[in-house]
Image (tube, grey):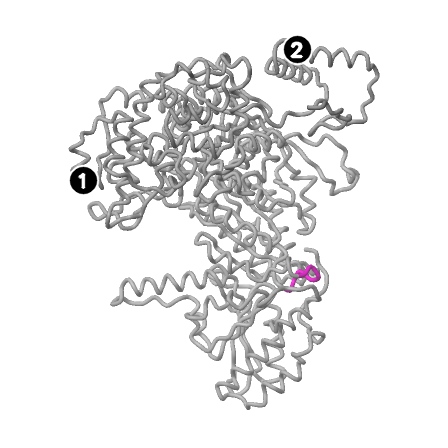
């Protein structure tokens, strides 16, 4: 083959080609030396020398290209492995018991008449990865340093239940109730465990929900970030707490799984370790059949700034690699695609000898004296080797300045037998044949007889050695030395939080005088006073995804400051201004950038601090309402599962209020999306005093005595209006329950009356309609401010459920029905949201009901024009009310058309409802 001259150019991620060669003669001497090293010692020796040179260059801070991938071998060589401190045989013994009980639990759940299934193979592939952590690394909640936080891979939950069974935390009845959370009764009581890590379903056990793939990695990153945040702000010493996240290689295809790696690197989160179980399989087949997922992930994580440790080969490979003087074995490892690796492990030792080692005479020679059994049993993958995994974990804990990812190669369905191990369908396989059970028992050395298995193959017995067993005592002692059992949740340990008194909310209740301000600014004023509270204020965590100025919160920058673990090492361009942009290690504001998903993860970490740290923190996540639930609804559902508490503030809300921005920004449905989350308490207040009462009650419900695991969602707007002072004797109960009579009707004649319901910015439209109806048509209209359509619906549904559960008992009347029974006449509802938001209360309205709504996509225009287009403004309410009176025979049929023409409802330029301007 001809030698082609390679022109100077940049190396990948490397040196620029513009660097001049100032001494060509010396350069040639270096090149000749490299050629000589290759000729004398071979390519492997030359590669080693090059790596040592790169290492020395980095030590001397010479700018050099990064290696994005390394050879397909273990990062830690056998000579660098630390001493293993445990009894490997004893730990293997109870690891086998856990494997057996985990598989049996899932198998029993698939028995006839139940058939709820489960996943056997994920834990089988990862048991060693978990047990090394449980036995040697993970500190429990009673540890003096506060304990570690473990994000367990969702599909591996059977292994955690099986371990808790041996620990004495769960009984056989619990395991038998796997995936039967309402129907598995013992002595009349529900005894069950959920399918996956769900804190809401098992609040004394699980801490972190992880089975919605992609959420776990993001939440783990922000949990580690939040731990440093607490430490740097002086609220808790978290220096001994470490976050571990267990992930699957297939899960890493989720954009969210890789989307925040830069955050962990930029903030130098050396308190974070990802362990990626690289069994090379997705749910249906290989992750990268034609490629190598480990190498891809190594390149990606290295490029993002992470420390990467590969654990690919068990100890049986060490002597082969040591004897591989030619580098032929490493070359084979480098060039074999994942699809072939899966095929090898699904066959026997003879197949591996012929199809892997046999591809090169030099590698075939390496195993010529090995039996097929030795090839099969001795050459394990690294993720199943206790010592290799221990070495990786130890290295991760010792590493400083970077987060670490451990890429552990395993076999999906490992130890379950040839019907499971490495098979494409193994993820969906939920039960074993009798022969599978016997083979599995034999390989694990479980003392259960054939007769016990044959008695009922659908219900093979669990194995428990007895409370006095020495092996069992060893397992339990390991956990006690490390600070107690995991996973574990203990919210009762949280320190009490002293809530602000009424004075803190006074600014919201006094109104804005003659000044026009939007409800966003009304909220910000209340929020600012809460942050000033000497005891409570430090527990607030403001979370803003790069929109603080839009929300009128830039005044927080110089006082609360923006959290940055590196401080501020530059002079801000606005340093001379009163509202200068200031970053600080002790900063209070989590300013996460244009990153709603990251903000949702930050919210979750802060909102569960009462449990994870025993330090209650109060997150206020303020965002463009359109980009909250719509973009990160899955994250907020997981936050609810994790029993998070805090406030979500949907700013610049409404389909027509954010004038000029257009379709993608126009939120006409976020309260409806919020209604799909059972933990969400959603409000759409019209005035500052309503916001004050809602926030105060929210703090009481979430952080006071008998705290509730709910999240408050409050929508606020950017349309400036004069904020009225709180009316004397205002109906606070009504504000909190969802509706109150804002302004009774007057001026009606002959008893003609209607009720007008509105929320948020729609309340002034209802007041406009009230005036039109009285002045032009002699109709009296009561105006009700509906602060929460969702809470009215929730309470009404509770009343219905009570009635259904006790048909002969006295029925409780829903609050909305009670309040609307106080007057008479048809009911018209409006807001800046689609009709389905108001229709939530329709079944319980005791009169004729019609909901106006901003259905359809938003668009850029003036507020009055947009509201006229959707027919949700004041005149549209008035005309609809008149039409309903006509339909009831209470007005002449011509009145509705006359009003329609009078107010020019078909002309968008005739709209009058709304003010111009107002960023906040």
- Sooner in the amino-acid sequence: mark 2 or mark 1: 2
Q: Which residues are magenta?
A: 656-662
Residue 37: mark in rendering? 2
Q: Is residue 609 left or right of residue 160?
A: right
**How many discs appear?**
2
Compare residues 63 and 469 and report the one nearer the observer: 63
The residue that mark 1 highlights is 456
Q: Is residue 444 left or right of residue 279?
A: left
Circle 2 SS class: helix
Percent position (x, y) of residue 920?
A: 68, 55
Compare residues 865 and 218 and report the one nearer the observer: 218
Q: Which quarter of the picture shows residue 745?
A: bottom right
Q: Which quarter of the picture shows residue 904?
A: bottom right
For the stretch drawn in magenta, what is the main secondary structure?
loop
Give the residue at x 55% y 91%.
892
Q: CA distance from mark 2 to mark 1?
A: 67 Å
* Relative to 624, residue 456 above or below: above
Magenta stretch encompasses residue 134: no
* Relative to 192, residue 683 above or below: below
Compare residues 583 and 53 and report the one nearer the observer: 53
Give the residue at x 53% y 45%.
500
Percent position (x, y) of residue 174?
A: 27, 40
Circle 1 SS class: loop
Among all residues in the image, which is located at the extreme top? 40
Magenta stretch encompasses residue 658: yes
Among all residues in the image, which is located at the extreme front? 1
Report the quarter where the N terminus lies. top right
Percent position (x, y) of residue 440?
A: 28, 31
């Amino acid at each position: 083959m001809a030698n082609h001259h390679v022109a100077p150019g940049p190396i990948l991620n490397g040196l620029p080609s513009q660097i001049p060669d100032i001494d060509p003669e010396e350069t040639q001497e270096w090149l000749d030396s490299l050629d000589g090293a290759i000729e004398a010692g071979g390519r492997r020796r030359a590669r080693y020398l090059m790596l040592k040179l790169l290492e020395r260059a980095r030590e001397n801070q010479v700018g050099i290209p990064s290696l994005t991938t390394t050879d397909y071998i273990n990062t830690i060589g056998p000579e660098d492995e630390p001493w293993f401190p445990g009894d490997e045989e004893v730990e293997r013994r109870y690891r086998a018991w856990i494997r057996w009980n985990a598989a049996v639990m899932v198998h029993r759940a698939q028995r006839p008449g139940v058939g709820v299934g489960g996943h056997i193979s994920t834990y089988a592939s990862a048991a060693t990865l978990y047990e090394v952590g449980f036995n040697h690394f993970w500190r429990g909640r009673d540890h003096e340093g506060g304990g570690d936080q473990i994000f367990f891979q969702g599909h591996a939950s059977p292994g955690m239940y099986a371990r808790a069974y041996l620990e004495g935390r769960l009984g056989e009845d619990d395991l038998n109730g796997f995936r039967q959370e309402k129907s598995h009764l013992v002595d009349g009581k529900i005894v069950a465990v959920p399918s996956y890590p769900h804190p809401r379903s098992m609040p004394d056990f699980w801490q972190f929900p992880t089975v919605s793939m992609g959420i776990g990695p993001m939440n783990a990153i922000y949990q580690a970030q939040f731990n440093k945040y607490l430490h740097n702000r002086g609220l808790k010493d978290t220096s001994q707490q470490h976050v571990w996240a267990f992930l699957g290689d297939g899960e890493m295809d989720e954009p969210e799984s890789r989307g925040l790696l830069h955050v962990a690197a930029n903030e130098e989160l050396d308190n974070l370790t990802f362990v990626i179980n690289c069994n090379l399989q997705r749910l249906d087949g290989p992750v990268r059949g034609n490629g190598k997922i480990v190498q891809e992930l190594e390149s990606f994580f290295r490029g993002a700034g992470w420390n990467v440790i590969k654990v690919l080969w068990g100890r049986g490979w060490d002597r082969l690699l040591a004897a591989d003087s030619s580098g032929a074995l490493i070359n084979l490892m480098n060039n074999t695609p994942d699809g072939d690796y899966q095929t090898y492990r699904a066959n026997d030792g003879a197949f591996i000898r012929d199809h892997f080692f046999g591809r090169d005479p030099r590698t075939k020679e390496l195993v010529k004296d090995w039996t097929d059994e030795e090839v099969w049993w001795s050459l394990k993958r690294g993720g199943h080797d206790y010592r290799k995994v221990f070495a990786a974990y130890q290295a991760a804990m010792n590493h400083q300045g970077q987060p670490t990812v451990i890429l552990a190669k395993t076999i999906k369905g490992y130890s379950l037998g040839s019907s499971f191990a490495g098979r494409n369908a193994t993820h969906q396989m939920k039960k074993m044949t009798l022969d599978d059970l016997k083979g599995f028992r034999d390989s694990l050395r479980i003392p259960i007889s054939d007769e016990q298995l044959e008695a009922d193959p659908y219900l093979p017995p669990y194995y428990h050695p007895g409370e006095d067993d020495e092996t069992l005592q060893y397992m339990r002692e390991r956990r006690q030395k490390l600070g107690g059992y995991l996973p574990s949740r203990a919210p009762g340990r949280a320190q009490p939080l002293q809530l602000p008194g009424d004075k803190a909310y006074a600014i919201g209740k006094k109104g804005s005088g003659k000044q026009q301000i939007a409800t966003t600014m009304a909220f910000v004023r209340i929020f600012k006073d809460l942050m000033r509270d000497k005891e409570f204020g430090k527990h607030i965590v403001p979370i803003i995804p790069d929109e603080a100025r839009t929300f009128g919160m830039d005044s927080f920058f110089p006082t609360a400051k923006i959290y940055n673990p590196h401080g501020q090492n530059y002079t801000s361009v606005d340093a001379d201004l009163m509202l200068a942009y200031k970053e600080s290690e002790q900063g209070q504001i989590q300013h996460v950038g244009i990153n709603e998903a990251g903000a949702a993860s930050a919210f979750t970490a802060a909102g569960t601090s009462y449990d994870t740290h025993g330090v209650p923190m109060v997150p206020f996540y303020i965002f463009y309402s359109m980009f909250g639930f719509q973009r990160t609804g899955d994250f907020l559902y997981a936050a609810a599962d994790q029993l998070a508490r805090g406030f979500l503030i949907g700013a610049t809300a409404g389909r027509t209020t954010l004038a000029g921005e257009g379709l993608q920004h126009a939120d006409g449905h976020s309260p409806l999306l919020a209604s799909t989350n059972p933990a969400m308490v959603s409000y759409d207040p019209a005035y500052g005093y309503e916001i004050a009462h809602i926030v105060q009650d929210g703090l009481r419900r979430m952080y006071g005595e008998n705290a509730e695991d709910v999240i408050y969602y409050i929508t606020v707007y950017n349309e400036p209006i004069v904020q009225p002072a709180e009316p004397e004797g205002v109906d606070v109960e009504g504000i909190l329950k969802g509706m109150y009579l804002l302004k009774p009707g007057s001026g009606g004649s002959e008893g003609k009356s209607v009720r007008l319901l509105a929320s948020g910015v729609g309340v002034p439209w209802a007041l406009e309609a009230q005036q039109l109806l009285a002045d032009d048509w002699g109709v009296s209209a009561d105006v009700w401010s509906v602060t929460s359509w969702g809470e009215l619906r929730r309470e009404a549904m509770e009343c219905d459920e009570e009635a259904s559960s006790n048909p002969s008992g006295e029925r409780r009347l829903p609050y909305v029905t009670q309040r609307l029974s106080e007057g008479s006449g048809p009911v018209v509802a409006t807001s800046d949201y689609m009709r389905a938001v108001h229709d939530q209360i329709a079944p319980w309205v005791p009169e004729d009901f019609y909901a106006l709504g901003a259905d359809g996509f938003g668009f850029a225009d003036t507020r009055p024009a947009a509201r006229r287009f959707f027919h949700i403004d004041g005149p549209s309410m008035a005309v609809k009310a008149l039409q309903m009176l006509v339909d009831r025979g209470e007005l002449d049929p011509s009145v509705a058309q006359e009003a329609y023409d009078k107010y020019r409802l078909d002309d968008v330029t005739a709209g009058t409802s709304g003010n111009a301007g107002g960023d906040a």
